[in-house]
Image (tube, rainbow, N blue to C red):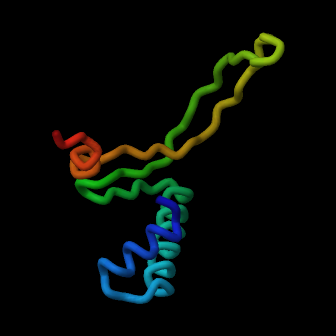
Amino acid sequence: MNKGELVAAMADAADVSQKDAGACLDAMFETIAAQVSAGNEVAITGWMKIEKANTSARTGRNPQTGEAIQVPAGTRTKVSAGSKLKAAGKSRS
């Protein structure tokens, strides 16, 4: 499912226009990005948790030459699935 399909499904489920559903989706992601960028954790209980995580410096390898390279410390965004999202992903036989 791509963004357009998601917006259409949201609009249908909430009985709103696709324009309004798209604006809400964009606002949600902008808000999440701003909060995570500021170092805050965003938790949607049962669905997911999104947070900034620090990575330590390490030695890596250039895949083309095999040469060892130093990868500096940095940050990444960590997304953890909640119980409802995990349950939705399990097959139902």
The image shows residue 12, relative to residue 17, as above or below, that is above
The image shows residue 22, relative to residue 62, as above or below, that is below
Tell me the quadrant of the picture where the C terminus can be found.
top left
Q: Is 86 situated left or right of 76 in this image?
A: left
Percent coordinates x, y for residue 92 in the rendering: 18, 43
Percent coordinates x, y for residue 72 in the rendering: 70, 29
The image shows residue 7, relative to residue 52, as above or below, that is below
The image shows residue 83, relative to residue 31, as above or below, that is above
Residue drawn where x is 56% and y is 42% of the image = 76
The answer to which of 88 and 91 lies nearer the viewer is 91
Percent coordinates x, y for residue 59 in the rendering: 68, 16
Residue drawn where x is 52% and y is 70% of the image = 4
Marker count (numbered): 0
The answer to which of 18 and 60 lies nearer the viewer is 18
Residue drawn where x is 50% and y is 41% of the image = 53
The answer to which of 16 and 24 lies nearer the viewer is 16
Q: Residue furthest left?
A: 93
The answer to which of 35 and 60 lies nearer the viewer is 60
Quarter residue 55 falls in: top right
Residue drawn where x is 75% and y is 18% of the image = 63
Q: Residue furthest front?
A: 93
Q: Is 21 situated left or right of 85 in this image?
A: right
Quarter residue 42 falls in: bottom left
Q: Is 9 situated left or right of 55 in this image?
A: left
